[in-house]
Image: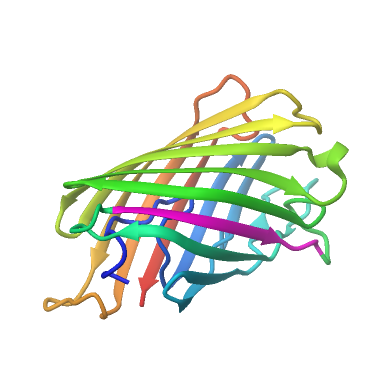
Amino acid sequence: MTKFQPTWMGPLIQSDARIGQTLKLAIGNLDFPPLQSTIYGNNKGVSVIVDHRFQLEVDPPAYFRNHSSTHKDGFGNLGTVVKWRMASGNADHGNFAVTAVMYHGYAPRTYQNQLLSSYYVPSIAAGKGVGHFAFLTTVGGLLPTAKIAQQGRAIDWNFTAQVHARPHVWFDVENNASFFLAGPFDGKMQNLMTPAAFYMVRRKGWKPEHAAVVFDCGMQIATSSFHVYNHNLVSEMRILF
């Protein structure tokens, strides 16, 4: 895919505008008053390229450890993702990418800690590289298929500014905004800022076809007066293959 795409680092929270093959192992630590939840898996999984334009991804249900005597622990929603690379170019051919993304979260089968029904998240992801910098954005919607009065809907907009600071090191700052429609948060907006850092481990004679390991960490921090949660510390290990 290096013939077709840029080589920036995939963001911590928002969808990458490129397609790729990755296994992600992640943990989130969510401050969600009155809960302090540890999220094992953090809705990350494995993605594979099935064609030079398509990526498929499976995200196993995350397990929520709520550290509470009143809120039971439990799983979130199983998710699948399909990406279609609409247009892109490597560093010599525009250094950009535009991709359509469809996420589907499946209805829960047991007591769980995320949405109460199945849902879809269609979005468009785009990015542009400029030297050592990259600017990435996604726009999409959270669309539950049932229980709208209890869950509502949302429009999500994310923007990331990233710098490739050292051969193995990237830093970025993401802005994650959600505009709620219907449901208990109708008319409200939540905004989160997410600084993150990434370190890639790869063999000395690394080539694009070689696997690499990335360690990354970031903190979502609420910056709007209304927010569903205060912050979320996310740690990941990615295996790129």
**Residue 96 vertical placement versus 23 (above, below):** above
Residue 238, quarter of picture: bottom left
Lateral position of residue 214 relative to residue 77, left or right:
left
* Outermost residue toward the top in this view: 225
- The residue depicted at 25 percent of the width and 60 percent of the height is 90
**Residue at x 31% of width, y 46% of height:** 128
Q: Is residue 101 magenta?
A: yes
Q: Which of 232/23 is in front?
A: 23
Residue 238 is inside the magenta segment: no
Return the x and y of residue 172 as percentages of the image width and height: 32, 43
Q: Please give the range of residues in magenta.
A: 96-108
Whether residue 82 is situated above or below residue 227 in the rendered picture: below
Rendered location of residue 150, percent (x, y)? 85, 39
Residue 188 lies in what quarter of the image? top right
- Is 155 left or right of 8, judged from the image as shown? right
- Residue at image point 80% right, 45% down: 70
